[in-house]
Image: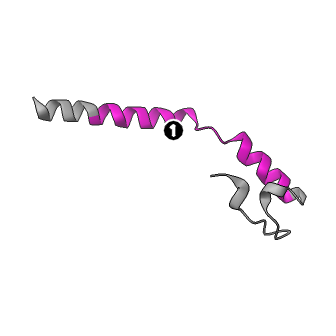
Amino acid sequence: MCCEHLICANCAGPVSEGRCSVCRSHKEQMHRSGAMSFSTMAAILLTMLVAVAFLTATLH
């Protein structure tokens, strides 16, 4: 999710413009945590491996 479509509840402006301190802090937080966390990536990889193993086992 990007901050281009978010509206600030404090100043009613777009968060991407950073009009107030609330906008700026939320924008910074979103950009800082924009990458997927290691645990999320590991869970996705594990799910994919289980799916491949299941499909391989059912096809043979």
Q: Where 18 falls versus 41 (above or below)?
A: below
Residue identified by numbered label 1: 40
Magenta-highlighted stretch: main secondary structure? helix
Q: Estimate the x, y position of residue 7 in percent, counting from the top left.
A: 75, 66
Residue numbers of the magenta segment: 22-51
Q: Estimate the x, y position of residue 29 in percent, counting from the top left.
A: 75, 47
Q: In the picture, residue 47 is in which quadrant? A: top left
Q: Is residue 36 left or right of residue 9?
A: left
Q: Quadrant of the C terminus?
A: top left
Coloration mode:
one colour
Q: Is residue 50 magenta?
A: yes
Q: Is residue 16 magenta?
A: no
Q: Residue at x 79, y 55 (%)?
A: 16
Give SS at disc 1.
Answer: helix
Q: In the picture, residue 14 is in which quadrant? A: bottom right
Question: Which residue is more in the foreground, 46 or 2?
Answer: 2
Q: Estimate the x, y position of residue 24 in percent, counting from the top left.
A: 85, 53
Q: In the picture, residue 51 is in which quadrant? A: top left
